Image (tube, rainbow, N blue to C red):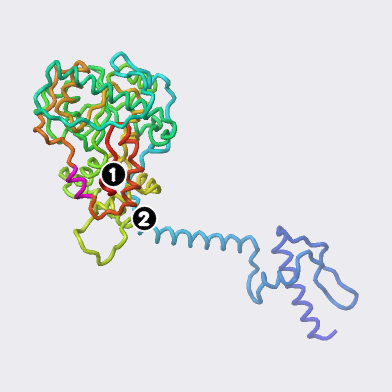
């Protein structure tokens, strides 16, 4: 054998021994150790792995890298790319809002007595057919009603309850009229144990004054006029416990025995009020509406972004398009509890799932407010603040002005979202917006 052949075979032996050493725990199994074939020198053993695989794993002049290490490096590289993609995407996704624990996600607590009428409830037999009734506008000032007017109010309230019952029992509308009694609903209901009162807040329907009434009833202040505005909406200082803070047994007891009420308003006029208060005026200086919520709605729902004319910031047409979108729930979850200013009465107070004792109307609040206080037997302890005559009446002209220029398609989609609120409380559908 020549010196060149011997050197070549020696190098091959060294090369294959490195393979054996590196792959003792590899998936490739070796059939036998190195052998000498009579006079011809050394040869590699027979392998279950093909030779090309080892040549790719053992580049000339480099250390052997096992297949498992190669897979680890590939996995690490993939993770790096995922992180880079997430960092890039986070610049376009607003994640500053707290997602409420139970908004549209937590199953209802099963307490059958929650919908049982109490001795204070006005709950007449259900009507046989659904009759649409329009709220009767007030013709009086803010002077308290006389005994005869109280009797008239009782009849009006009875008709409201009959209408509510009939719509709630309409199986074809069940998806629009019923909602789980989740923490989101219980968070909206304030408790006055001293006088056995439950009040469900419906924002943009005069809730500030009703909160003042409850604060006085709880004994924190002697009169409504003495309550600072900064205290009313500070739930850590106003002394108003929420129903969600109680145990399931305590919740069931109060829902079945306490006087329960809430106030409603024409659904579209309420949306206009919410838009003006949160995105145009913002009197309580809540910057997150303009700086966080408005940009998120604009990015998704404004048809023309760059070079558009008009006032800066969120427009009412953007707001309408967002509210009428069936896929808006992703933004709603991102916005958290701030959505209470424009979600439906059904989502806020579950009127078909809780037997409310009285339902007041913003349009007739001059009569409804003192009548509710009297029905709850608290009119001797507190008075509702004076209401300027006519200020709560429905303003059709304002509604027409705000909806001018909004497409009929968007108006129809908005009405579909709030249809139950119109029917449950006797408000006429806004057909004049579609003519």
37 versus 227 height, above or below: below
324 versus 43 height, above or below: above
Q: Residue at x 69, y 64 (%)?
A: 22
Question: Which quadrant is home to the N terminus?
Answer: bottom right
Residue at far top of view: 119
Residue at far right of view: 38
Q: How many residues crowd mark 1 within 10 Å: few (<14), some (14–19), many (20+)? A: few
* Residue 397 image offset from top left, x and y in percent: 17, 45
**Magenta part of the chain:** 396-402
Q: Nearer the viewer, residue 181 or 161?
A: 161
Q: Residue at x 28, y 15 (%)?
A: 120
Question: Is residue 203 toward the left or the right of residue 112 in the image?
Answer: left
Question: Badge 2 is on which residue?
Answer: 93
Circle 2: element type: loop
- Image mark for residue 431: 1
Circle 1: element type: helix
**Mark 2 or mark 1, whichever is nearer to me:** 1
Q: Residue at x 16, y 33 (%)?
A: 231
* Residue 312 image offset from top left, x and y in percent: 20, 58
Helix, strand or loop: magenta stretch: helix
Earlier sequence position, callout 2 versus callout 1 = 2
Q: Is residue 432 visible?
A: yes
The part of the image, by quadrant, that contains residue 285 is top left
């Amino acid at each position: 054998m020549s010196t060149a052949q011997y050197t070549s075979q020696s190098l091959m032996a060294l090369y294959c021994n490195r393979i054996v050493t590196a792959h003792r725990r590899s998936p490739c199994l070796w059939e036998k150790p190195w052998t000498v074939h009579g006079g011809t020198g050394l040869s590699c053993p027979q392998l279950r792995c093909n030779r090309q695989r080892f040549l790719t794993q053992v580049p000339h002049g480099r250390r052997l890298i096992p297949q498992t290490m190669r897979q680890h490096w590939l996995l690490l590289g993939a993770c790096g790319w995922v992180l880079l993609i997430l960092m890039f995407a986070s610049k376009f996704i607003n994640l500053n809002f707290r997602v409420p624990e139970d908004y549209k996600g937590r199953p209802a607590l099963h307490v059958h007595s929650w919908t049982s009428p109490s001795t204070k409830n006005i709950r007449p037999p259900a009507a046989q057919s659904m009759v649409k009734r329009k709220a009767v506008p007030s013709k009086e000032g803010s002077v308290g009603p006389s005994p005869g007017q109280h009797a008239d109010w009782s009849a009006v309230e009875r008709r409201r309850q009959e209408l509510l019952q009939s719509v709630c029992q309409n199986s074809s509308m069940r998806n629009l009229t019923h909602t789980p009694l989740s923490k989101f609903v219980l968070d909206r209901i304030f408790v006055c144990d001293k006088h056995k009162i439950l009040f469900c807040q419906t924002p943009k329907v005069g809730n500030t004054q009703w909160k003042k009434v409850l604060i006085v009833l709880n004994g924190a202040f002697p009169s409504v006029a003495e309550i600072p505005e900064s205290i009313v909406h500070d739930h850590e200082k106003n002394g108003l416990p929420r129903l969600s803070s109680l145990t399931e047994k305590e919740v069931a007891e109060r829902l079945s025995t306490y006087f329960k009420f809430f106030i409603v308003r024409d659904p579209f006029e309420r949306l206009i009020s919410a838009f003006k208060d949160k995105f145009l005026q913002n009197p309580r200086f809540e910057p997150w509406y303009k700086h966080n919520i408005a940009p998120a709605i604009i990015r998704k729902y404004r048809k023309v972004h760059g070079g558009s004319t008009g006032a800066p910031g969120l427009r009412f047409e953007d707001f309408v398009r967002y509210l009428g979108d069936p896929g808006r729930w992703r933004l709603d979850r991102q916005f958290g509890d701030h959505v209470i200013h424009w979600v439906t009465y059904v989502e806020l107070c579950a009127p078909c799932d809780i037997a409310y004792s009285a339902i007041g109307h913003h349009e007739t609040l001059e009569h409804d407010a003192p009548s509710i206080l009297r029905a709850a037997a608290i009119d001797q302890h507190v008075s509702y603040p004076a209401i300027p005559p006519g200020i709560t009446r429905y303003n059709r002209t304002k509604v027409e002005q705000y909806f001018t220029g909004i497409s009929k398609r968007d108006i129809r989609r908005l009405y579909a979202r709030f249809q139950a609120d119109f029917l449950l409380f006797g408000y006429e559908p806004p057909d004049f917006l579609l003519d």
